[in-house]
Amino acid sequence: MQIKKFDSMNVVPFIDIMLVLLVIVLTTATFVARGVIPIDLSDSTSSDKITKEIPLEITIKSNGDIFFNKEQVVKENIITKLEKFKKKTVITISCDKNSKFENFVYIIDILKDKGYKNLGIVTKYE
């Protein structure tokens, strides 16, 4: 019995797999691209103008200082300052990475207790 020399490799199964993967990627990409429904809104002269709410930026510094829109707030006055904002206000929280986690949890607990749900946490992407 003579041993056959292996000169070439059958790449047809590899091409089939790559084509299937290509179809999956292209199909998924079209669904992601169509995430927003494009519409052309009608004009109206009698509608009320939407008043834009002022978003709230809560900043926690490394030494524990808490700021509401660049105004320093004492920990005891957070609830009274927070009640000035509506429940649907967009709230972003920035916390120094060297600050105590306790302050962050304290703020989140107050926001959750008072019914604020439109929250965002600001991070740095590198």
Image: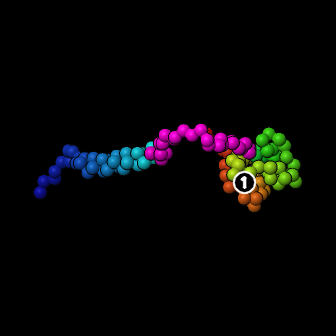
In this picture, residue 33 sits left or right of residue 60 = left
- Residue occupying image coordinates x 71% and y 49%: 89
- Residue occupying image coordinates x 72% and y 54%: 87
The x, y position of residue 36, in whole percent, is 49, 45
Depicted 112 relative to depicted 52: above or below: below
In this picture, residue 84 sits left or right of residue 11 = right
Depicted 111 relative to depicted 52: above or below: below
Which residue type carries mark 1?
Answer: Lys
The x, y position of residue 14, in whole percent, is 28, 49
- Residue occupying image coordinates x 37% and y 45%: 26
Q: Is residue 98 visible?
A: no
Q: Residues within 10 Å of mark 1 (few under 14, many from 20)?
A: some
Count of all numbered marks drawn on residues in the image: 1
Q: Quadrant of residue 48?
A: top right
- Residue occupying image coordinates x 47% and y 45%: 37
Would you say residue 49 sits in the magenta stretch?
A: yes
Viewer-closest of 118 and 25: 118
The x, y position of residue 113, in whole percent, is 75, 61
Span shown in magenta: 34-57
Q: Main secondary structure of the magenta part?
A: loop
Q: Is residue 19 visible?
A: yes
Q: Residue furthest left?
A: 1
The residue wearing badge 1 is 87
Q: Quadrant of the C terminus?
A: top right
Viewer-closest of 87 and 16: 87
Q: Determine whether the residue tagged by mark 1 lies in a helix, strand or loop.
A: loop
The x, y position of residue 109, in whole percent, is 75, 59
Would you say residue 36 sits in the magenta stretch?
A: yes
